[in-house]
Image: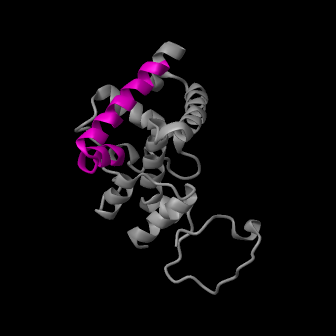
């Protein structure tokens, strides 16, 4: 599958709105890696938060989750190598503020919460971010969620095990019940 096609399909999955640096990074070859991730830009707390939040957004089920396919390293690489200094600083500030707000609200950092508590807290932040975005520009949580989804669905696992991939698709059938298909197509 071509990278451009994967981006188009991921954008369609996300409702068509994608943060410009994300597109630029993926077009320039930024993809997740399953190799051991050693943070370069993120400090220890930011790296723990990135892992916990990515795992909350796309947890391991019958397929590997975001952490297993290397999404936290992909996010750091995108922020470090593709974002402008202003965007990078905004992202890092958002990461720290997210954890600080979590500590003030729950008494623990996000990475220390149980999986259920992480899900509840992230769900609430997602709702708030959607409401706030309508008022003024992209919100940290939605940018993080976008990076997680793009990283996951452009990985080999996301493109072949979660999405359906067929190098040479068959005939076109315009009206097929979703139950007959099962999953959406990667190409």
Quadrant assignment, res 26: bottom left
Tell me the quarter of the image containing the N terminus.
Answer: bottom left
Tell whether 115 sits left or right of 78.
Answer: right
Quadrant assignment, res 177: bottom right
Residue 180 sits above or below residue 30 on the image? below
* Residue at image coords 56%, 63%: 163
Of residue 10 and residue 57, the one placed in the foreground of this image is: 10
Residue 104 sits above or below residue 136 on the image? above
- Segment tinted magenta in the rendering: 74-102
- Evaluate whether residue 73 shows in this view: yes
Q: Is residue 99 magenta?
A: yes
* Residue at image coords 52%, 73%: 187
| Image coloring type | one colour
Taking the view exactly as shown, the residue that stands out farthest to the front is: 135
Residue 28 sits above or below residue 145 on the image? below
Tell whether 31 sits left or right of 112.
Answer: left
Q: Position of residue 54 (x, y in %)?
A: 46, 40
* Residue at image coords 57%, 27%: 121
The total of numbered circles placed on residues is: 0
- Evaluate whether residue 59 shows in this view: no
Q: Position of residue 20 (x, y in %)?
A: 38, 54
Q: Position of residue 64 (x, y in %)?
A: 50, 50
Chief secondary structure of the magenta span?
helix
Q: Position of residue 182 (x, y in %)?
A: 69, 65
* Residue at image coords 39%, 31%: 94
Quadrant assignment, res 111: top left
Q: Is residue 54 magenta?
A: no
Tell whether 87 sits left or right of 149.
Answer: left
């Amino acid at each position: 599958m071509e990278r451009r096609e994967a981006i188009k399909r991921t954008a369609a999955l996300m409702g068509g709105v994608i943060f410009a640096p994300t597109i630029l990074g993926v077009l320039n070859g930024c993809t997740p890696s399953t190799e051991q991730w050693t943070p370069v830009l993120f400090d220890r707390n930011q790296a723990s938060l990135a892992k916990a939040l990515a795992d909350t957004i796309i947890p391991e089920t019958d397929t590997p989750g975001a952490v297993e396919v290397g999404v936290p390293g992909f996010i750091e690489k995108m922020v470090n190598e593709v974002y402008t200094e202003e965007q990078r600083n905004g992202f890092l500030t958002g990461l720290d503020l997210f954890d600080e707000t979590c500590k003030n609200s729950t008494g623990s950092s996000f990475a220390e919460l149980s999986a259920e508590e992480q899900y509840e807290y992230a769900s609430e932040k997602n709702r708030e971010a959607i409401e706030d975005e309508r008022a003024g520009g992209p919100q940290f949580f939605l940018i993080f969620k976008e990076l997680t989804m793009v990283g996951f669905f452009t990985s080999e696992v996301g493109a072949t095990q979660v999405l359906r991939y067929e190098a040479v698709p068959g005939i076109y059938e315009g009206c097929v019940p979703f139950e007959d298909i099962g999953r959406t197509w990667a190409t």
